[in-house]
Amino acid sequence: MTAYRYGEYHDGPDPLAPPYDVRAALDEMGDAILSGSTPVHALRDLLKRGLPGAQDHRGLDEMLREVRRRRRELRERGRLDGTLEQARALLDKAVGQERAELFPDPSDEARLRESELDALPDDTASAIQQLNSYEWRSAAARRTFEELRDLLRREVLDSRFRGLRNALANPDPAAMERVRQMMSDLNDMLDKDARGEHTQADFEEFMGKYDDLFPEKPRNLEELVDILARRAAATQRMLASMTPRQREELNNLINQTLDQAGLSEQMRRLGEALVARRPDLAWNTPERLTGEEPLGMGDAVTALEELADLSQLEAALRQDYPGARLDDIDEAAVRRALGRAAVDDLEALRRIERELEEQGYLLRRRGKLELTPKAVRRLGETALRRVFSSLDAGRRGDHDQHDAGSAGELTGSSRPWHFGDEQPIDVVRTLVNGVRNGGLQRQAGPVERAGARARAGERARAGVVRLSVDDFEVAETERRSAAAVCLLVDLSYSMALRGTWAAAKQTALALQALVASKFPQDAVQIIGFSNYARVLQPDELAGLDWDMVQGTNLHHALLIAGRHLDRHPDFEPVVLVVTDGEPTAHLMRNGTSAFEWPPSNETLELTLAEVDKMTRRRATLNVFMLAADERLKEFVDEVARRNGGRVFSPSAERLGEYVVSDFLRMRRAR
């Protein structure tokens, strides 16, 4: 039998995890949008914060912090001159061993050799070059010098090819010859590609021979070129980061090592090809490392290569340039720097960005993100839930009238149908009435069986039920009285200055959502007013911004609200006003707005005249005052005296609760 073993899934995100609820992402964006942010900036802020939920994913800011921490660690890792220091130490060791061998010998040859060692130049590369032809008397010194040459060969080649350090760990002429052949084949393949003759089969044949020399496992020539170019550029940055003397000394060591290995020409060809293919890399930009531990050449190049990756990744994660998109972030760089989990987090962020558009919450129009009507409805529902969460459970007003009617929730009872009824038909009770009243008739078959009679309990599929008018019943529902609702919202600049603008928009959205979901028979109109007043459509509420103009034209807003009430004479009038200042503008006969501050007598008289008209329409004006100005208090007190409405002075945080509660109270009272 086949044995199965179960364990934690490690190759990416949990494939059985529920998908992230994109509506929660929209809710996260809602506060910023309602505060005046654009959908683009709200989405960018969400992606920077990350996505809360059952499967928390890191946002761009957390990834950015991790990248910066990793950069600090790399900079503090060590010094760049480790190879020079190791080479100097091995050289001094070899010379010391040779001197120890020569010292007991009293011959002139020994003294001559000692004078030759004394004359070695201070420059490490020049000293090594002179000793290449020196006949070592000491076997230990000869081994040390060979160790030095092996070190330089490994470090120089490892600085260009990450996998060659291990391949050349043992001094094997065959291994060195294989490296020479690999570089020759690589340059030939690059030349062939430059002529447009390269195929994927050529690359696969190359990798079939030298796969073990490339631990990165590139899948095509472009990936291989990218790997080699980034490492070659890091080598150049390492040299640029050294002092002039260190740079000259290390350059001489590199050139000597390549000459001795027979790789100078091949390395020159490769370097030119890589620079030509990737001129965008920072080839000679110095990078400062501040650590104390000396790093070998290969390790130093690896550190600088990672630092270059992290610098580019940091710029992409900041997303602070025009037209920035998550697609700009290199997934391979994220994987190299932060691991597979970060790739999964990035993909989750990209998925949210896509889903918001694909599920109809965001619309990209002429390169600009906009909220769709579906998104606005969602924001309204969210605002309403927040309002209800702060209300007492017993005050979440349903209607108090429960006699039979044409709208509302089903009561569970039914009654006979009468002409003109619009309630839904109660199908079950209607059919039962038909059967009881003898309407069930058996279908005749091709052969009549003796004694067969229709039974009252026979299933309906065995016959037909003939219905008469008297058999029909309708399901009863709660009757709901209809209301004409007007919410007048101040759009003046002072609302933004006082920080109440977002609360006003949330309140308008919450009221719109409440009426649409609980009271669909009501006619709601949102009216915004500054120097002029205008009707606001539900779809524009979320993206609405305050008007940077002078004037609080409540007179014009009441005129528009009055026309809305007059269009629905049989509806109960509900008028709510949200403002932070007394009227300072009115509409003149020619249709233009007249502004004056302090308010003129004409402005106050015309505005109060509209209040009186509202009173004659039996419409109660309840005013929600968002400031404590004395003139505003005097004005709203006069409105309350003339109209009989109430005055509220809520904080911005509780504005929605006050407005919705008052609306529900008035609807229950009706």
Image (cartoon, rainbow, N blue to C red):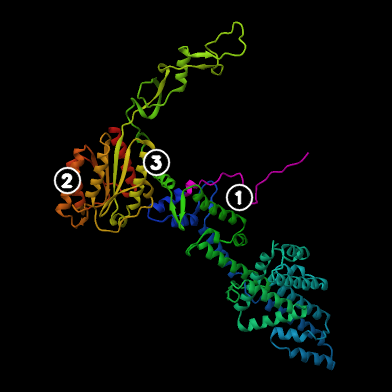
Q: Is residue 495 visible?
A: yes
- The type of residue carrying mark 1 is Pro
Give the Cα separation between the discs numbered 3 and 2. 38 Å
> Dot 1 lies on which element?
loop
Relative to 16, does residue 590 appear above or below in the rendering? Answer: below
> Dot 3 lies on which element?
helix
Q: Is residue 14 magenta?
A: yes
For the record, the magenta segment spans: 1-25
Residue named by callout 2: 609
How many dots with numbers? Answer: 3
* Residue 42 badge: none
Number of the front mark, 3 or 2: 2
> Dot 2 lies on which element?
helix
Relative to 418, does residue 79 appear above or below in the rendering? Answer: below
Tell me where residue 331 sits by quadrant.
bottom right
Magenta span: helix, strand or loop, mainly? Answer: loop
Residue farthest to the left, as pictured: 601
Number of the front mark, 1 or 3: 1
Number of the front mark, 2 or 1: 2
In the drawing, does residue 669 fall left or right of residue 334?
left
Camera-side residue of 656 and 532? 532
Residue named by callout 3: 389
- The type of residue carrying mark 2 is Ala
Tell me where residue 343 sits by quadrant.
bottom right
Residue 312: image x %, image y %?
56, 66
Q: Is residue 638 magenta?
A: no
Of marks 3 and 2, which one's residue comes earlier in the chain? 3
* Residue 13 badge: 1
